[in-house]
Amino acid sequence: MRHMVAPLPAEFTGLIDRFGRKITYARLSITDRCDLRCIYCVSEGMRFLPRNQLLTLEEIARIGRCLTELGVTRLRITGGEPLIRRNAIWLFEQLGALSALHDLSLTTNGTQLVRDAFALKAAGVTRVNISLDSLQPARFQRLTRVGTLSKTLNGITAAIRAGFQRIKLNSVILRHHNHDEVLDLARFAINHGVDISFIEEMPLGLNSSRCATYYSSDAIRHDLNQVFELIPTAERSGGPASYYCIAGTNSRIGFISPYSHNFCADCNRIRMTAAGGLLPCLGQAQSIDLRRVIRANPLDDQRVKSAIYAAVMLKPLGHEFTHAVTSTLTRCMNMTGG
Ligand code: SAM
């Protein structure tokens, strides 16, 4: 969709949307490609974008700089699998050098971390989220269609050795697929001294079996409460997660509950696809074509900043996630950037 991009207001005081929410966090997808094919993420027969439609790493670095100059203090790099993009480390180095940035983080499936963990830490990455949905090799392969569990486990070990400020596992829990592993995954996180978030599957991409696989955060919490004492914390990320400490451990457990606990009122984030689509809301289809703006204005950052501001002004009050198949967004998470 093409929108008119108005200049930044003269009295600009930050990226504040129509509902008074301040946007300080951006998630940037740097590729739609992935070396895994998780069943809830990538649809069967998924076609990836031709390379010339992706933003270059230089363009992404420029957008990252513009975002921080507009008041964004946290950037998360995601995909697809960000670490399979050639020269990705160069981008982390550019972003890590931005003085206004407080927090540079990464979401990864872990398969490349044995190679990249130390370089990422040296580039200034503070926090890493690593996706891990099963500890059973055959099941891990079924859920990822092509993955090998040991590669991700070795990646987790490498990340721990590199010494990031915070490592968090992300587990999407699906009824009949891995809901019986909630306790094992939590024990794994505790034994490795890392955090873990359990995620409700979001209705992105064409998948008609969401209702059958839905397993709520409340059900997961109920399972955990049989064994662990969960102590609520006040920590909020401005997103869909709520966090608990696990008594007697250093690990925290998060619940990411887009269905059962609406989080839109506190939302502080925008997302960019690998093709430069700036999405004010994960759960709505609207976007601003930042690639067109950045390519038409190679020397004019004001135009880029105005386009970012315009996307924030489009931010709706809330997402429209429901279990209804008809309301499913056809955009998969690997295109959006999770
Ligand atoms: N390749 C990286 C990874 O595996 O973490 C980054 C991209 S992946 C799209 C980011 C996160 O989105 C992962 O934790 C993944 O589990 C999650 N995700 C993907 N599709 C999802 C869906 N339909 N519902 C909930 N989470 C989803």
Image (cartoon, rainbow, N blue to C red):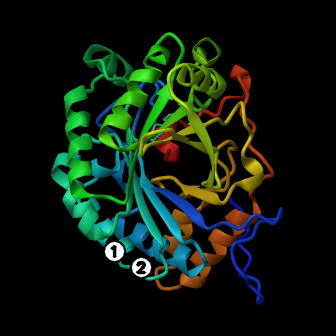
Please report contact status of discs 1 and 2: CB closer than 8 Å, yes or no.
yes
Q: Quadrant of residue 287?
A: bottom right
In the displayed structure image, the side of residue 174 where residue 263 appears, left or right: right
Residue 33 location (% of width, % of height): 35, 42
Left or right of 225 on screen, residue 93: left
Percent position of residue 338, x then y: 50, 44
Is residue 133 at least partly visible in the picture? no
Secondary structure found at label 2: loop
Numbered mark located on residue 94 in the image:
1
The mark total stands at 2
What is the residue that sits farthest to the front in this orientation?
A: 248
Residue at point 55%, 81% (across, down)? 69
The CA distance from mark 1 to mark 2 is 7 Å
Secondary element at image label 1: helix
**Mark 2, residue position:** 98
Residue name at image x 41 percent, y 46 percent: 250
Q: Amino acid at mark 2?
A: Leu
Closer-to-camera residue (217/112): 217
- In the current view of this chain or complex, which residue is farthest to the left? 115
Q: Does mark 2's beta carbon lie closer than 8 Å to ligand 1?
A: no
Q: Residue at x 43, y 43 (%)?
A: 251
**Of the residues shown, which amino acid type is indicated by label 1?**
Gln
| Residue at figure coordinates x 50%, y 10% from the top left | 176
Relative to 240, does residue 90 appear above or below in the rendering?
Answer: below
